[in-house]
Amino acid sequence: MQFAPSARQLLATYHIPFESWTIPDAERSRIADAPIGLAAFYTPGSRLGPTEIQMLQSIQFLIALDMSYLKAEFLTAPEQVGIIIHELGHVLNPAIYDPCSCMNAALDEELYADYYTIHCGYGSEFASAMAKMRQANVHGFASSSIQQRLDELASPSSIRLNLPPEQRPR
Ligand SMILES: [Zn+2]
């Protein structure tokens, strides 16, 4: 993972540097090595500078953190980390589509990213962050699928993972 200056500053300000995340060692290595960039932006839009543009050339995914919602007055430090880990889950634990599933593909994508937060030890923190977003009427958090995801995070039917075989929990 590569950190844009905006992301580095954000993690330092909120006292959540990558080193402080309490995640399994295997995931720490995977995240560190992944072609993912992290940058912060401000609603409704932000300018990216030369450093960020340069970073974009060596990554495949950019995780953009909206500072309007990732605020320390609003979220606890573990909740902030949970949100970042959910986004990492979209890349590192991609959904395996189950043709028999009644779930839709978009929901499956979210569920797999949610399962990744559980796998990394931040499931309940991510769930409480999502509940706060809904409480605050953040756009997109009023949908019924949010409740479905919160229910699943509270008591997962199974923690579906799509990790490299050597990193699956035994
Ligand atoms: Zn998501």
Image (tube, rainbow, N blue to C red):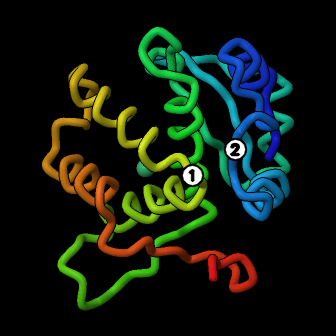
Outermost residue to the top: 73
Q: Amino acid at mark 2?
A: Thr
For label 1, the residue is 121
Compare residues 148 and 100 and report the one nearer the observer: 148
Compare residues 120 and 37 and report the one nearer the observer: 120
Residue at position x 45%, y 74% in the image = 160
| First-in-chain label (1 vs 2) | 2
The x and y percentages for residue 20 are 76, 34
Residue at position x 56%, y 57% in the image = 89
Vertical placement of 119 versus 12: above or below?
below
The x and y percentages for residue 40 are 63, 24
Element on which disc 2 rests? loop
Residue 22 is labelled as 2
Q: Amino acid at mark 1?
A: Gly
Vertical placement of 112 versus 61: above or below?
below
- Specify the quadrant that holds the C terminus: bottom right
Q: Residues within 10 Å of mark 1 (few under 14, many from 20)?
A: some
Answer whether labels 1 and 2 touch (C-beta < 8 Å): yes
Residue at position x 83%, y 58% in the image = 29
